Image (spheres, grey):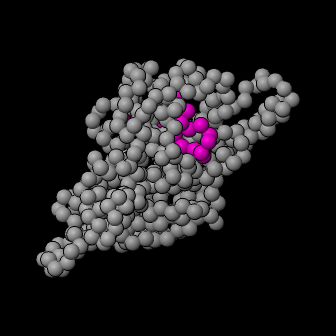
């Protein structure tokens, strides 16, 4: 199953590009589903169909849905929602507010990622296209398996022990409801599923990210930061889609001036991102809504090629051993050595802080108790060196 994730700054046209890609995939015979995980949904507007929290058939080979976390909590995690609601009610919180508070932080991200597993396990689709929220939310979405696993691994066992003790002690004397076995089982399912999600998202043979931007300074700068942080979280960026490009034959003094500005930004994009593949979508007179406009955009971006083609399969992170020294290579474009901080974490891990993002990287069991010797930069790669104990 091919997974294509579109990411970029708000307003650059991610949804249109994602919708155009989905339509082209479906027309080529690929069983395709496109999912919007942006709370400010506009996918239905782009496809010119009414979408909902349930999967809707748009046309032959093309399904779509707009994620709704309240619907997901009611239908998929009702045991967790019911328990948290009951707990809130026991503390005097009103019924409606209790249901709203039952939506735990991060559940929107979990729901979106679990759909990926659902589609993979069902074998129903050949292509999954994800239309993401603006860059910051997307980084939280794609880093969520790492962050959630870190917390769950440490807290879940503790919670299970506390509940088992409480059931035979204070649980018989207080009114606060304790989580049932079903609630605990649901939490454990979430933990196990997140581990699988991480594997799927970090598989460069099937899952890649395409960054959408406009030929303007702010989107270019944000895309550079996004590229760096996605590499930090070991997600494979395969290409750029430069949207809203002015055609070279524009008329008028004002438009020709804008074209000159655009050309300078195009040079900036190539200097920053080459040899990453770059594709273009021009500004169209046709409204980018529904079939004709989206198909015209797909023609501009993909030409006669298949959108599911993978343009880069190299993982941003890998290990190598040389001369008794183990090395962790992490691709860090647009970063200087002084921008990065390293810490040896507990439980056989290393913590890497790049800019305002931080990731805990689990080390192989062979590096248990290994000494971290330091790090260096080689081209765009951060190389962290370890010496095994003994």
Q: Tell whether position 126 is magenta.
A: no
Q: Quadrant of the C terminus?
A: bottom left
| Position of residue 96 in the picture relative to residue 266 (left or right) | left
| Residue 100 on image: x %, y % | 37, 58
Please tell me in which quadrant of the rendered image residue 186 appears. bottom left
Q: In the rendered structure, which segment of residues is drawn in magenta?
A: 1-20
Residue 163, placed above or below residue 143: below
| Residue 273 on image: x %, y % | 64, 43
Q: Tell whether position 11 is magenta.
A: yes
| Position of residue 38 in the picture relative to residue 172 (left or right) | right
**Viewer-proximal residue, 385 or 295?**
295
At x 67%, y 23%, the residue is 285
Residue 63, placed above or below residue 276: above
| Residue 369 on image: x %, y % | 37, 71
Q: Quadrant of the N terminus?
A: top left
At x 83%, y 30%, the residue is 256
Please tell me in which quadrant of the rendered image residue 325 appears. bottom left
Is residue 205 something that shows in the picture? no
At x 17%, y 62%, the residue is 181
Is residue 230 something that shows in the picture? yes
At x 78%, y 24%, the residue is 250
Residue 62, placed above or below residue 97: above
Residue 356, placed above or below residue 224: below
| Residue 78 on image: x %, y % | 26, 53
């Amino acid at each position: 199953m091919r997974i294509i994730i579109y990411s970029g700054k708000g307003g650059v046209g991610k949804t249109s590009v994602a919708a155009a890609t989905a339509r082209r995939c479906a027309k080529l015979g690929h069983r395709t589903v496109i999912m919007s995980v942006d709370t400010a949904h506009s996918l239905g507007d782009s496809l010119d169909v009414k979408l909902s929290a349930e999967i809707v058939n748009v046309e032959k080979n093309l399904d779509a849905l707009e994620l709704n976390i309240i619907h997901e909590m009611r239908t998929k995690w009702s045991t967790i929602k019911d328990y948290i609601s009951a707990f809130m009610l026991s503390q005097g919180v009103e019924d409606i507010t209790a249901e709203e508070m039952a939506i735990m932080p991060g559940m929107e991200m979990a729901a979106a990622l679990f759909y990926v597993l659902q589609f993979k396990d069902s074998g129903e689709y050949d292509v999954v296209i994800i239309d993401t929220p603006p860059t910051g939310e997307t980084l939280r979405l794609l880093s969520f398996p790492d962050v959630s696993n870190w917390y769950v691994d440490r807290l879940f066992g503790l919670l299970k022990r506390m509940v088992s003790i409480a059931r035979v002690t204070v649980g018989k004397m207080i009114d606060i409801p304790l989580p049932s076995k079903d609630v605990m089982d649901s939490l454990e399912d979430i933990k196990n599923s997140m581990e699988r999600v991480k594997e799927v998202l970090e598989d460069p043979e099937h899952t890649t990210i395409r960054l959408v931007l406009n030929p303007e300074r702010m989107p270019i700068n944000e895309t550079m930061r996004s590229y760096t942080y996605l590499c930090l979280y070991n997600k494979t960026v395969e290409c750029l889609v430069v949207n809203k490009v002015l055609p070279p034959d524009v008329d008028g003094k004002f438009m020709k001036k804008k074209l000159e500005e655009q050309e300078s930004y195009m040079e900036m994009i190539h200097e920053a991102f080459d040899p990453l593949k770059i594709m273009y979508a021009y500004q169209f007179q046709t409204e980018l809504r529904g079939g004709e406009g989206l198909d015209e955009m797909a023609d501009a971006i993909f030409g006669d090629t298949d959108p599911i083609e993978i343009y880069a399969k190299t993982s941003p992170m890998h290990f190598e051993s040389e001369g008794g020294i183990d090395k962790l290579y992490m691709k860090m474009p647009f970063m200087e050595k002084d921008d990065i901080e390293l810490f040896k974490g507990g439980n056989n891990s290393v913590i890497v802080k790049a800019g305002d993002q931080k990731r805990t990287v689990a080390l192989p069991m062979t590096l248990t108790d290994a000494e971290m010797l330091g790090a260096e930069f080689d081209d765009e790669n951060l190389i962290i060196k370890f010496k095994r104990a003994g």
